[in-house]
Image: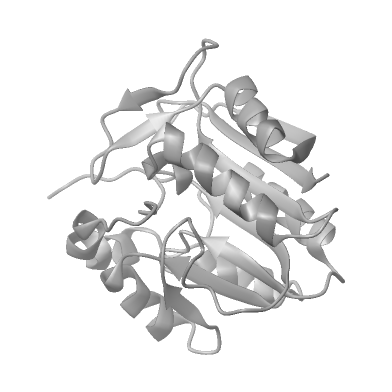
């Protein structure tokens, strides 16, 4: 049986697809019935929901996968839409959370319906986007949101400063970022950092970073 670890994220590639996630969607649904594997993830999502509360428009879950986090945010009062390029993952998301809208799309948000964006969440999904395309996606997001819009990104982190590092993800090509490097990419796109969390767990091989920013 293929082993997958929590926090590995969902597939999300600009203008590309990830058939590996289609093949493993059933296994993901069986392995990860809960939205979060570590308490710190839940706390970060709750803080993000607080930052997004009351803002006009929809909160976008980029790389929503099974839709569990989108559902949690909806229970916290946000108007949420999930975006993912994996048809297999979206089948499960729509089955598990039929009350929520999910669209087939990537980090460019090109498939997102028109309308204001209240906030953007990308948890362990931008790891599958080539670093140059991550920077392009962040600039695209900046062009679609108003000043003050919160954006939370979560990713497997690198310990040493420098460019993103490719790592052996079980499903798809993936990169780890040093938190300072990702924060700079966000700043270059027009987002100001509000806080970050870098967390290590004995059961996980990489540190996990979460950075909340707001559109300047």
Q: Is residue 38 visible?
A: no
Tell me what residue is drawn at x 61 percent, y 66 percent. 60
The location of residue 149, given as percent across then percent down, is 79, 56
- Residue 68 versus residue 121: which sits nearer the camera? 121
- Residue 9 versus residue 13: which sits nearer the camera? 13
Which quarter of the picture shows residue 87? bottom left
Quarter of the image with the C terminus is top right
The location of residue 117, given as percent across then percent down, is 70, 68
- Residue 34 versus residue 85: which sits nearer the camera? 85
Q: Is residue 156 left or right of residue 189?
A: left
Check the image and report above or below for 128 versus 94: above
Check the image and report above or below for 152 versus 205: below
The location of residue 18, given as percent across then percent down, is 25, 56
Tell me what residue is drawn at x 69 percent, y 76 percent. 75
* Number of marks present in the image shown: 0
Q: Is residue 6 left or right of residue 115?
A: left
């Amino acid at each position: 049986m293929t082993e997958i670890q929590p926090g590995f994220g969902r597939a999300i590639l600009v203008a590309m697809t990830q058939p590996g996630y289609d093949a493993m969607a059933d296994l993901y649904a069986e392995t990860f019935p809960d939205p979060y594997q570590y308490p710190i993830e839940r706390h970060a999502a709750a803080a993000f929901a607080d930052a997004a509360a009351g803002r006009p428009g929809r909160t976008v879950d980029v790389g929503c996968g099974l839709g569990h986090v989108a559902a949690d945010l909806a229970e916290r009062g946000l108007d949420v839409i999930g975006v993912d390029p994996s048809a297999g993952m979206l089948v499960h998301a729509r089955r598990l959370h039929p009350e929520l809208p999910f669209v087939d799309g990537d980090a460019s948000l090109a498939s997102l319906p028109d309308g204001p964006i209240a906030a953007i969440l990308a948890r362990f999904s931008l790891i599958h986007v080539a670093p140059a395309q991550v920077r392009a996606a962040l600039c695209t997001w900046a062009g679609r949101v108003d000043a003050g819009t919160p954006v939370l990104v979560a990713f497997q982190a690198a310990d040493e400063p420098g460019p993103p590092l490719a790592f052996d993800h079980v499903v798809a090509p993936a990169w780890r970022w040093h938190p300072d490097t990702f924060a700079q990419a966000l700043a270059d796109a027009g987002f100001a950092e509000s806080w970050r969390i870098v967390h290590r767990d004995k059961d996980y091989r990489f540190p996990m970073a979460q950075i909340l920013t707001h559109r300047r």
